[in-house]
Amino acid sequence: MNLKSILASTLLLAANIGIAADEEVEKLLSAMRGAYKDAKTAKLTLKSTMLFEEKEASTIFEATFKGPDKLYMYTDSMFGADGKFKVICDGKTITVSSPEGKDEIPYSIEDLSGVGPLNLETLCFWDYQKQLSTGDDGNMKKSEFKISLDQDWNEKKWTILEETANEQGVLVKYWIDPKSHFIWKTEVAEIKTKTKFMTCEIQKLEIGLAVEDSLFGG
């Protein structure tokens, strides 16, 4: 085989590897969308940790979701600050209560997704179609990916999806249960410095439980 043939074969192999990797990412994202779509209700305990001036601070949230757009989220203390923080969405209005007062805004997926220090481990329950898509309208359309299988965390084996979002300047790791395809942990770091500034961990998750509309003010 001459040099030209070797180079051609190498390029073909590289292309095939890229296609295979893309196919595996799309297969995983499709399975994840299906899991969140089927989760009509969810109750979870979430630990959110943020980096503030080189010091970490954490908050424990209790959240209940009822599809497609109802959410109740509560914490006794937002990152150690005094006062309770609560979000109630009935599908028409988002009400945010904090020590500073109460705000009400008309419902939208975007506004609901911006009410607290959350990532895809929570957002996907009501916004899986956009959050987990590389299509034209998807939040991942310009991202690059890497998949790692059978990774250890919390005494279990996980699938880790690593997302490089160059436009946002962040690296995100998602710990995904290989059986249920739900995300249990996310880590967000800056691309340039590799500094991790946000971690969200689900400590408890219940799917398919009975949830009354009265919880959301409906």
Image: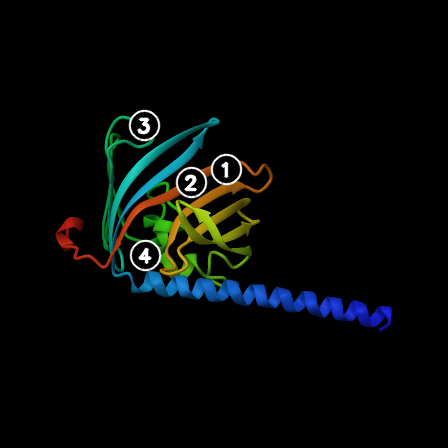
Tell me: 128 left or right of 197.
Answer: left
The residue indicated by pointer 4 is 126
Categorize mark 4 by other alpha carbons within 10 Å: few (<14), some (14-19), many (20+): many
Q: Give the CA separation, mark 1 to mark 2.
A: 8 Å
Q: Nearer the viewer, mark 3 or mark 2?
A: 2
Q: Amino acid at mark 2?
A: Thr
Residue nearest the viewer, comparing 166 with 51: 51
Categorize mark 1 by other alpha carbons within 10 Å: few (<14), some (14-19), many (20+): some
The residue indicated by pointer 2 is 199
Q: Give the CA separation, mark 1 to mark 4.
A: 26 Å
Instruction: Specify which label sits upstream in the sequence, 1 or 4.
Output: 4
The residue indicated by pointer 1 is 196
| Residue 159: % across, % down | 46, 55
Q: Give the CA separation, mark 3 to mark 1.
A: 20 Å
Instruction: Specify which label sits upstream in the sequence, 3 or 1.
Output: 3
The quadrant of the rendering that contains the N terminus is bottom right
> What secondary structure is found at the residue carrying circle 4?
helix
Tell me: 214 left or right of 203.
Answer: left
Residue nearest the viewer, comparing 103 with 165: 165
Instruction: Specify which label sits upstream in the sequence, 3 or 2.
Output: 3
For this orientation, the residue located farthest to the right is 2
Categorize mark 3 by other alpha carbons within 10 Å: few (<14), some (14-19), many (20+): few
> What secondary structure is found at the residue carrying circle 2?
strand
